[in-house]
């Protein structure tokens, strides 16, 4: 009997991490097409989660549980998707800039991107400019994210962008910035592509910018 | 005066001088305390500072692991706890020893470092500047319900992020003569602020007896101590500068989702500093703190308006009193983006709860937008709120004079009290509103039908137009400037 993708979506919405992971494996073993599993099972489920979040029917802890289920499924699916040349959400590298120790907001953004199927590389906090540059070279992400919670550290984001330009790799990535003192205007000023006000809207904006 | 009451010396009476409010019983406090001790013995707290690690290692009691986790046995914590002062008196540059931090004495003040200022006239926000900090200082200097000043805003136009704290302190001093709580960039920054304060207090020794400020220092929840925070703490210990180590956990994000769990964790974070400062220099004036709130699960906002903030903070104050530590707490703040009904409601609840709990320094009064926006008008509004709150705190006196049996007798059925001496003597004990309107419809209309909001705006403007704080004399100003210039030079 073919694996029931509707049930997979339901399990994902309910945040059943292990069940989703097992079911993805079953579907793969069954020979189901990886894109079909992704679209019909995982993404269909996350779409509902997104709608319910906006309607105040689901809250952050529930959304993150579903995101975890999504990412557990993606661990199994990603190699197959890449192999088949199917379009995946892409890689998102994120970190907090030098001198800044605020951690939790950036982590929430990272988790939400995982929930959207991205391969997320979370570099940590208090990062030198060079760490961002090296990470872009190494991971070749579609999207680079920088977080700054202090007026005193936010100029570092501009420094990273300049360093990427100098390294000749600025145009390889879209750049998103966010954090309490950052504004849309400031993002434009320093040459970032996207301003993220909060975790949920950042994912929407990120996907949009990547033409999803 | 002959007593008219039949029995004015009853036995076995319990009377209250003030209302009584507590959240935790002693047994609950002990449960939390023992759990926190367990956290320090089993889990430990990470310390990113070499001298501190050395101090822990050479204590002979604490255990430091490879990953910089410090675990501390209960016996050392309990020894350390005994060494802290139960009283610290702050003296402003106005020469008044006006803030006597001791059990159940409550003082209100602002918060610090708000990156934006909300402009009520345009409805827009802009980056906060030096002048905004001076203006906030002038408002706090003028208004009677404020006892201490934190910068409210951040001096966003300072030349260098590495030295902004010196400029910020200068702006604070220009605007306000009351005692302060100061934030600093690092140990070196704190040293400069302390030197500046010593200029005004008459030297290092006088500062020790009459400190002008408390240094604001925070760990990173959960259970992490970064290098700059520890640097500040050790410097404060060395010089005897009052300091607080105030965790800012958000329940459900950087701390457990239960209030008790958050209190356990933040107490463990505090106790680590208690031990560290004790090892550095026993008896330094360390203050307990905590902005203990929830992360809103819809918006991810670190909430300054949640009722849980008030509840957890009051519980934390109960713990501080049991530990015989001075408490730095939170009130008068809001998640609202502007100064509106939400801001008023949230500010009121947290001010009232903090006051009733007996916290010593209640800060963040006037914060809007969850600690991101500054608002001078919010400071003015909160002054009125705190006045009302303090009135509630006065409690009900029930001695003969206040039971007023004699007066009731004299006036008798059908009489009036307005012209009675007793009224003349006592009515001034009431709260006198300055901004609350209690007029009739006709009068209110004739006077322009102004809402609270408009009255707040006018009062804010009036203070800004008229209040000039006591100036800093030129010689002192020169010395302060020299300290700032030297810092600029070092960091250029
Ligand atoms: C890549 O794309 C993106 C997209 C979206 C992005 C993004 C990146 N990054 C963030 N987002 C967005 O999405 C996230 C999820 O929805 C959101 O992330 P947030 O991080 O905003 O949201 C979190 C989930 C909840 N929010 C938070 O956790 C931050 C709350 C506030 C109160 C705050 C906290 C808790 C802390 N702090 Co700090 N802190 C404040 C904050 C005030 C505020 N309301 O922002 C702020 C930012 N802090 C400030 C200050 C002054 C400081 N803090 C400091 C320290 C800390 C703590 C360590 C105690 C703690 C952080 C603990 C931790 N584990 O992260 C110090 C600096 C330490 C350092 N070097 O970094 C210190 C300097 C205090 C001192 N003098 O010691 C102020 C900023 C002043 C300025 N210069 O601009 C401040 C506005 C509060 C205030 N008014 O004082 C969005 O911003």
Image (tube, coloured by chain):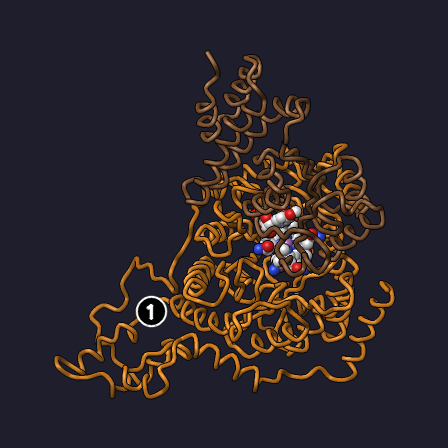
Viewport quadrant of the N terminus of chain B: bottom left
Q: Which of the 4 image quadrants contains residue B9?
A: bottom left
Which residue is nearer to you in this view: A189 or B460? A189
Q: Which chain carries label 1?
A: B
Check disc 1 and report its element: helix, strand or loop: loop
Which tint is chain A? brown
Question: Quick one: label 1, few (<14), some, or many (20+) residues within 10 Å?
Answer: few
Name the residue nearer the viewer: B1 or B462.
Answer: B462
The residue singled out by tag 1 in the image is: B397
What residue appears at the point 55 percent right and 47 percent down from the top-left corner? A201
Q: The orange chain is which one?
A: B
Q: In the displayed structure, would residue B85 be above or below residue B380?
A: above
Pinpoint residue A153: horizontal percent, then vertical percent: 72, 56
Residue B32, image x and y in percent?
51, 40
Judge whether B166 appears above or below B446 on screen. Answer: above
* Above or below, A177 relative to B469: above
The quarter in which the C terminus of chain B is drawn is bottom right
Whole-percent x, y for residue B218 in the image: 65, 52
């Amino acid at each position: 009997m073919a694996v029931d993708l509707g049930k997979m979506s339901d399990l994902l919405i309910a945040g059943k991490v292990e069940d989703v992971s097992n079911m993805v494996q079953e579907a793969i073993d069954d020979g189901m097409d990886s894109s079909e599993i992704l679209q019909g099972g995982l993404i269909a489920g996350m779409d509902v989660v997104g709608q319910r979040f906006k309607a105040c029917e689901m809250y952050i802890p529930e959304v993150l549980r579903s995101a975890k289920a999504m990412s557990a499924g993606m661990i199994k699916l990603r190699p197959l998707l890449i192999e088949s040349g199917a379009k995946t959400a892409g890689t998102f590298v994120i970190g907090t800039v030098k001198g800044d120790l605020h951690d939790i907001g950036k982590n929430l953004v990272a988790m939400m991107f995982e929930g959207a199927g991205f391969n997320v590389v979370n570099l940590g906090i208090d990062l030198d400019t060079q760490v961002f540059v090296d990470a872009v070279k190494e991971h070749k992400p579609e999207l680079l994210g920088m977080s700054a919670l202090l007026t005193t550290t936010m100029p570092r984001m501009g420094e990273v962008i300049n360093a990427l330009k100098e390294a000749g790799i600025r145009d390889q990535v879209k750049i998103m910035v966010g954090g309490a003192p950052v504004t849309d205007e400031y993002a434009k000023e320093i040459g970032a592509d996207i301003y993220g006000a909060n975790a949920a809207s950042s994912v929407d904006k990120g996907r949009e910018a990547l033409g999803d | 005066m002959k007593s008219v009451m039949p029995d004015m010396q009853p036995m076995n009476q319990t009377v209250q001088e003030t209302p009584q409010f507590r959240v935790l019983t002693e047994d609950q406090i002990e449960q939390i305390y023992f759990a926190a001790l367990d956290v320090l013995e089993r889990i430990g707290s990470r310390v990113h500072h070499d001298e501190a690690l050395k101090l822990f290692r050479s204590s002979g009691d604490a255990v430091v692991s490879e990953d910089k986790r410090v675990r501390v046995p209960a016996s050392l914590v309990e020894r350390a706890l005994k060494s802290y002062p139960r009283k610290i008196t702050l003296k402003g540059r106005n020469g008044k020893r006006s803030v006597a931090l001791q059990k159940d004495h409550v003082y209100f003040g602002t918060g610090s470092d708000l990156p934006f200022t909300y402009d009520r006239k345009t409805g827009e926000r802009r980056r906060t500047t030096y002048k905004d900090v001076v203006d906030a200082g002038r408002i706090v200097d003028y208004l009677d319900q404020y006892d201490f000043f934190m910068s409210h805003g951040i001096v966003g136009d300072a030349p260098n992020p590495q030295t902004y704290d010196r400029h910020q302190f200068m702006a604070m001093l220009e605007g306000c003569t009351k005692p302060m709580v100061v934030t600093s960039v690092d140990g070196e920054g704190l040293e400069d602020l302390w030197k500046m304060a010593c200029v005004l207090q008459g030297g290092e020794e006088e500062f020790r007896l009459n400190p002008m400020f408390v240094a604001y220092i925070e760990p990173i929840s959960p259970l992490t101590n970064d290098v700059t925070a520890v640097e500040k703490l050790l410097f404060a210990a060395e010089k005897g500068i009052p300091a607080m180590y105030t965790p800012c956990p958000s329940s459900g994000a950087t701390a457990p989702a239960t209030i008790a769990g958050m209190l356990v964790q933040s107490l463990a974070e505090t106790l680590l500093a208690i031990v560290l400062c004790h090892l550095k220099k026993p008896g330094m004036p360390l203050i307990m703190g905590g902005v203990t709130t929830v992360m809103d699960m819809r918006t991810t906002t670190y909430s300054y308006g949640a009722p849980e903030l008030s509840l957890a903070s009051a519980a934390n104050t109960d713990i501080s009193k049991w530990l015989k530590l001075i408490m730095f707490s939170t009130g008068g703040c809001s998640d609202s983006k502007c100064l509106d009904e939400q801001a008023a409601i949230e500010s009121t609840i947290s001010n009232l709860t903090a006051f009733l709990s007996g916290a010593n320094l209640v800060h963040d009064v006037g914060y809007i937008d969850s600690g991101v926006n500054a608002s001078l008008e919010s400071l003015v509004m909160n002054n009125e709120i705190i006045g009302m709150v303090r009135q509630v705190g006065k409690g009900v006196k029930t001695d003969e004079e206040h039971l007023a049996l004699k007066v009731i007798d004299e006036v008798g059925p059908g009489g009036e009290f307005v012209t009675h001496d007793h009224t003349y003597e006592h009515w001034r004990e009431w709260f006198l509103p300055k901004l609350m309107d209690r007029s009739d419809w006709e009068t209110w209309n004739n006077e322009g039908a102004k809402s609270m909001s408009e009255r707040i705006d006018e009062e804010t403007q009036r203070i800004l137009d008229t209040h000039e704080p006591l100036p800093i004399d030129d010689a002192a100003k020169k010395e302060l400037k020299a300290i700032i210039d030297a810092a600029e030079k070092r960091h250029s």
